[in-house]
Image (tube, helix red, strand yellow):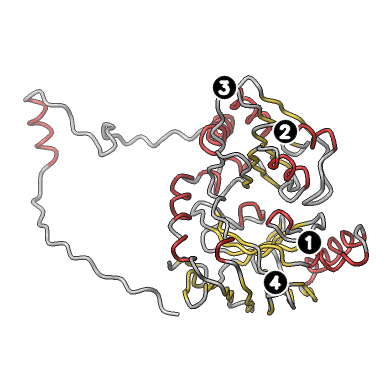
Amino acid sequence: MAPPFRKKGVDNTASVPVDSDIEALLDEEEGMPAPVEANGAHETNEEPRELSPEEAMTASATMVIETCMDIRRGENLLIVCDPTTTDIGKALHDAASERSDRVLLIVMPKGRHHGDEPPTPVAQLMRQQQVVIAPTKYSLTHTRAVRQATNEGARVATMPGMTTEMFTHGGMSADFKAVKKAISDMNPVMRRKRFVNVKSESGTNVTFEVNWREWKTEDNGICNRPKAVMNLPAGKIFAMPTKGTMNGTIVIDGSWDSDLVDEPVTLAIESGLVIDVKGGATAGKIRQAFGEAAKRLKAKDQENVWTIAEFGFGMNPQARLIGNVLEDEKRLGSAYFSIGDNSRLGGTASVGINISGVLAQPSIWLDDTLIIENGTKVV
């Protein structure tokens, strides 16, 4: 897999050395202003002042409210947090209150797992809003509450597993307008591509089909349209694999849910379902979590908890592999597979659990087009 051919540029310009100290003295004698740098600031040896933690929280919250969610004057906004994210919830509330006087902050009990439904009063409040922002320990993305809210016209941003450090650094510090353009530029590449092949040096080799019209490119950091749903930090392209088409082996060697993996986790896939899980303690946790979710379903639906619900790859150049899937799956050059509920993407596996695992350095083909090679984007 050779890297793409690049033409070498040729610089035919010649430069004439200039003694800048003499130039500056002559300019000063003639009353001319001192030279400035390209950004318009006078040359200085001072480094930019680092923001305090409080200032960083305020800056990030303001960016979410003004750039990501584009809150308008008078919009109804609900911020849903839990005891692990109250500082983030308050920062968002304070920033949003500068834009609207219809901002409500609610602290709900911490959920049990990703996809767990919020309390009924919270779900009812979500349906009455134009905007919902949910920094919570466990994801609300794949819940009936979010689907109902978006059906009523709300735009929703979820932040599962968000921490104060993540809120002010890494993927949240990206230029989301640039991320949006980079994702948009991938549309011609994905057009009319049907087959996906993912490999990795750690052992992944899996193939499946995707309806090319169903690639989701809205997870770009700009959530300003009714009925939109987005994670923050944002920056990924994803789709639901066509039912029953996935076969092969997936090796999770980056992170699973909220932890970096010490030992790679191997998933055997047959007709779109996980049929075996191996890989030490993490594999045991996976079997336990999905086994418990299956027990809550009717017997005929229990195997659906093992559905490969989603595949995607990261497009955020500031995101890091830190042991939190919210950021890990957005990292430029990474890829992820999620298991469980795919109803948000139009699937039939409504199983109340959805957890993702990240591949650190995959290679990805769309038909015969290589788009990522060993964790490096090549297209």
What type is the residue that disc 4 sits on?
Pro
Tell whether label 3 touches label 1 (CB within 8 Å): no
The secondary element bearing badge 3 is classed as loop
Residue 328 rendering spot, x and y as whole percentages: 61, 57
What type is the residue that disc 1 sits on?
Ala
Residue 354 rendering spot, x and y as whole percentages: 75, 57
Of callouts 3 and 4, which one flags the residue occurring earlier in the amino acid sequence?
3
Residue 260 rendering spot, x and y as whole percentages: 68, 61
Of callouts 3 and 2, which one flags the residue occurring earlier in the amino acid sequence?
2
**Who's the residue at 55% across and 48% down the image?**
171
Separation (CA) of disc 3 from disc 2: 19 Å
The secondary element bearing badge 2 is classed as helix
The quarter of the picture where the N terminus appears is bottom left
Q: Which residue is mark 1?
A: 349
Relative depth, front residue between 178 and 83: 178
Q: Which residue is mark 4?
A: 264
**Who's the residue at 68% across and 74% down the image?**
250
Q: Which residue is mark 2?
A: 86
The secondary element bearing badge 1 is classed as loop
Position of 13 compared to 228: left or right? left
Separation (CA) of disc 1 from disc 3: 41 Å
Separation (CA) of disc 1 from disc 2: 32 Å
What type is the residue that disc 2 sits on?
Thr
Separation (CA) of disc 1 from disc 4: 26 Å
Position of 186 compared to 21: left or right? right
Q: Which mark is residue 98?
A: 3
